[in-house]
Amino acid sequence: MRTRWLLLLATFCGAAGTARAQARPGGATTAVPPAGEWPAPGRDLAGTRFSPLNEISPRTIAGLKLLWSYGTGSLKGHEGNPLVVNGHLYLHTPHPVTVSAFDLDRPGSPPTWTYSVPSRDPAPAVCCDVGSRGLAWHPSGKLYVPLFPGDLAAIDASTGKEIWRVRNGDPRAGITMPAAPLVIGDVVIVGVAGGEFGARGYLTAYDALSGKQLWRGYSTGGDAEVLIAGAANANYQSLRGRDLGLSSWNADSWTRGGGATWGWLTADPELNLVYYGTGAPAPLNPIQRLGDNKWTASLVARDVTTGQVRWALQLTPHDAWGYDASNENLLVDLAIGGRPVKALVHFDRNGFAYTIDRISGRILLAEKYGPANWASKVDAGSGLPIVDSAYAGPGKTSGVCPSIMGMKTFQPSAYSPVSKLFYVPVNNLCMDVEPGAAAFSAGRPYLGATIRIMPGPGGNRGRFIAWDATTAKIVWEVKEEFPAFGGALVTAGGLVFYGTLDGWLKALDATTGRELWRFKTPSGIIGNPITFAAPDGRQYLAIVSGVGGWPGQALYASATSKPTDALGAVGAFADLANVTNPGGVLLVFGL
């Protein structure tokens, strides 16, 4: 009954497709989600974070009220967002990860079940909190849960019982599991963190039903381990050649070279490709890893079935600033110069927004979306950034923008096929960097730099922008006192939602950027809002507040902490404690 109602609702709201996602032999998924559901981290495989629901609109937003809430019991950072499938909401917490199911027929009632298992590992040492960015769902009724110390678990979505669990990380080497998995057909794919410990990053695919490993592709090393056959990207000279994951490093530095895969995954079922970005090279001190350091700070497209690299594109060669390329890749069809393009739009931490042909990996547009002084532009012929010599030296660098936190970090952007705009939460931070020697020991921090972060031009530390990826221009902008560490949601109702570090959940007019509504949540927001239709047919909005993550380290700082601790977060966010406190709470709103 519930599923039939949601399918009818999808038709009523004008969804692009209403059938539940189905797998086909090639491993791809052929349908978009029902309009009222949120079954994947970014709602759809393209990661647009767009909902076709329109009951909550600029006309009705004044009537949006908090209806029920649930305290998670965790004081760590609450990243990612819940899933909503078949009339149930599935909520996850930071480490030690628990998953709770809520029956939306009984709003405000206790969870119908909670999955919580003792970790087989001691709590790992990490640089920037123990958050989990989310769950994934499979039509067989399974949820996939990344357990932070290193396991991927499959559980029954109706009972919370564990079905299988596999070892994907290694906390002894600093390889942990904060990343949200992605289900594509009968394949579940997941990445790892650990670049700050010198761990080699990799992406792994498992059979969604059995948990059998299907393939694993590394971020550094020879072509056989990276899974490259032929040129990684024929469009650019610097990306052709064999075993570039070895030859672009000095000596054996690639073996401890980073390239973590902790960011968001997206996929194109028609092309049978999964897209993701790799993290910065390790250590931060660039003298210890001469060369371009491929394939760190790169975008990668892999075949879902085999893991083979279709193309790779390094955005920041020899990344001396810790920018990496782990931000989300939104897959949309655009018209550029009058020509239809299967595009990939990526707002990189290095300060450039890229519009890329997602079939070939060729850059179509690349422009700054905020203050980025480390490079003047991206050269159209080579695809390489033109680095400013003032910021390219081996010694201390002052006033480089953006900071190591990136012009945006893991908070995902959203795209509306109605407005044809991208909605992007942005940081406005710069930094001083002083390299130092880093000694490698497995499972220990491998940093090699002291960082001081400060506000960027204008003094505000955050922005929220609307971006036209066909012209590479900002359409409108909202300034924020703190970095915008909450993800974006856009709806067919013409609204954009996002949360702030000081705990405000906001709704803007998607066309003009005018603020229409706000609500003060119990804690700062570093997660992502979602919207869904409950079995009663009404539209609801949900967010999990719970400050933490990298900026949240300032809240846990002791009296002896230095401003440079936690890679500059303590000094940069010292005033955060004046406006918010830790503590996870799920909040559900309705008209």
Image (spheres, rainbow, N blue to C red):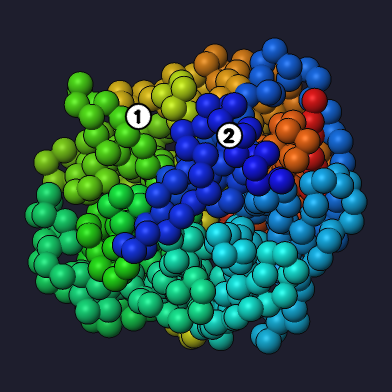
Give the residue type at disc 2.
Answer: Ala
Visible in this render: residue 439?
A: no
Along the line of sight, which residue is nearer the eye, 331 or 226? Answer: 331
Placement of 484 over or under 261, stated as above or below:
above
Q: For mark 2, what is the residue?
A: 10
Q: For mark 1, what is the residue?
A: 469
Rendering coords of residue 228 (x, y %): 20, 70
Rendering coords of residue 343 (x, y %): 30, 39
Left or right of residue 541: residue 427: left
Q: What residue lies at 69% left-to-right and 24% top-to-bottom?
A: 56
Along the line of sight, which residue is nearer the eye, 482 or 546? Answer: 546
Q: Residues within 10 Å of mark 1 (few under 14, many from 20)?
A: many
Q: Secondary structure at mark 1?
A: loop
Placement of 494 over or under 191, stated as above or below:
above
Left or right of residue 396: residue 554: right
Give the residue type at disc 1.
Answer: Ala
Rendering coords of residue 254 (x, y %): 30, 76
Q: What residue lies at 16% left-to-right and 38% top-to-bottom?
A: 380
Q: Residues within 10 Å of mark 2 (few under 14, many from 20)?
A: many
